[in-house]
Image (tube, rainbow, N blue to C red):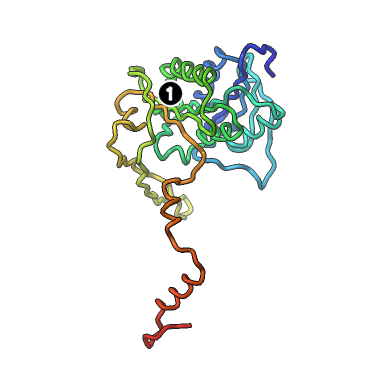
């Protein structure tokens, strides 16, 4: 654990696996800031969302991949990694910061729902740890993360200095390429994947399916993460894990949930074959 109390302790997690280039870049930045502890999946866990392992045991082993870094690999999901870090590595004491990534591929807009990278950061926020997820618009194994580093350091230092509102974390996405215009605070765009399943046949003539899709943006606002990324900005979206649709509560309160009235209405509207009411 952190022997230098002047330095913050930083938990680094991801969903691409402990050997992914993105996490190496994130570790390098965090080493400039504080004492780094890494807990990451032993293999790729992209698209796992907030899944946790409950039906089988978890393997959890210390590894030595990078100098002066305390590292553990986990057989479970990104969220499992955060849970094990808090309960096993930190023994209930919380790190000063949790950072997740750098993900190979964007986690803007609706992608935040599916993202293992962001779910790990969400779990950190649930544990009341200031948390940030970082993602780059590049799926390549040899993706260049160098242009992200100064922004990651700046954002992380600001979070350490100022904290975050309760139950809130940051979703940070980077465009591909080094010519970035700066940071833009955004809202999540209204966009989704128009998905299709490509049907194929294996060597035994059995069908299988490969998920494909096209990303469709329905949101023309210039204050969204999609717009920011398309125009060369680093997008920063504050995210919350309270999924309550607060604007819908007054609407639901205007409905009638009286069982007696509901049953009578159902009886009156249900007609038999002869046109008469059933019941």
Q: Nearer the viewer, residue 82 or 105?
A: 82
Pick the front one: 100 or 245: 245
* Residue 42 appears in the rendering: no
Say which residue appears at 34% left-offset and 33% top-offset: 224
Q: In the rendering, at what x and y percent does residue 231 appear? A: 29, 26
Residue 25: percent from the left, percent from the top? 50, 19
Q: Residue furthest bottom?
A: 274
Q: Position of residue 16 (x, y in %)?
A: 52, 31
Q: Is residue 92 left or right of residue 166?
A: right
**Which quadrant is the N terminus positioned in?**
top right
Residue 269 in percent (x, y) is at 40, 76
Q: Is residue 170 visible?
A: yes
Task: Give the SS element for disc 1.
Answer: loop
Quarter location, residue 17 = top right
Q: In the depicted view, which residue is nearer to us: 177 or 222?
A: 222
Q: Quadrant of residue 145?
A: top left
Say which residue label 1 marks.
Answer: 143
């Amino acid at each position: 654990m952190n022997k230098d109390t002047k330095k913050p302790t930083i938990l680094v997690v991801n969903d691409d696996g402990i050997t992914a280039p993105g996490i190496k870049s994130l570790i390098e930045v965090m080493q400039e800031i504080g004492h780094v502890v890494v807990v990451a999946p032993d293999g790729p866990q992209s698209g796992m969302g907030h899944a946790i392992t409950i039906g089988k045991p978890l393997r959890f082993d210390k590894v030595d991949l990078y100098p002066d870094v305390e590292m553990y690999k986990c057989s479970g999901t990104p969220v499992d990694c955060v849970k094990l870090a808090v309960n096993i590595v930190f023994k209930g004491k919380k790190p000063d910061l949790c950072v997740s990534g750098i993900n190979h591929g964007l986690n803007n807009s609706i992608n935040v729902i599916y993202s293992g990278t962001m779910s790990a950061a969400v779990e950190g926020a649930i544990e009341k740890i200031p948390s940030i997820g970082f993602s780059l618009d590049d799926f390549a194994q040899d993706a260049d993360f160098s242009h992200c580093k100064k922004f990651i350091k700046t954002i992380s230092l600001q979070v350490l200095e100022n904290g975050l509102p309760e139950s809130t974390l940051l979703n940070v996405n980077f465009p591909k390429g080094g010519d970035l215009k700066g940071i833009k605070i955004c809202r999540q765009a209204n966009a989704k994947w128009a998905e299709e399943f490509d049907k194929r046949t294996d060597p035994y003539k059995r069908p299988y399916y490969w998920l494909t899709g096209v990303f469709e943006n329905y949101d023309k606002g210039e204050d969204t993460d999609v717009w920011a990324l398309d125009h060369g900005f680093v997008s920063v979206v504050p995210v919350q894990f309270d999924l309550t649709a607060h604007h819908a509560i007054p609407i639901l309160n205007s409905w009638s949930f009286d069982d007696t009235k509901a049953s009578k209405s159902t009886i009156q509207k249900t007609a038999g074959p002869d046109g008469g009411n059933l019941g």
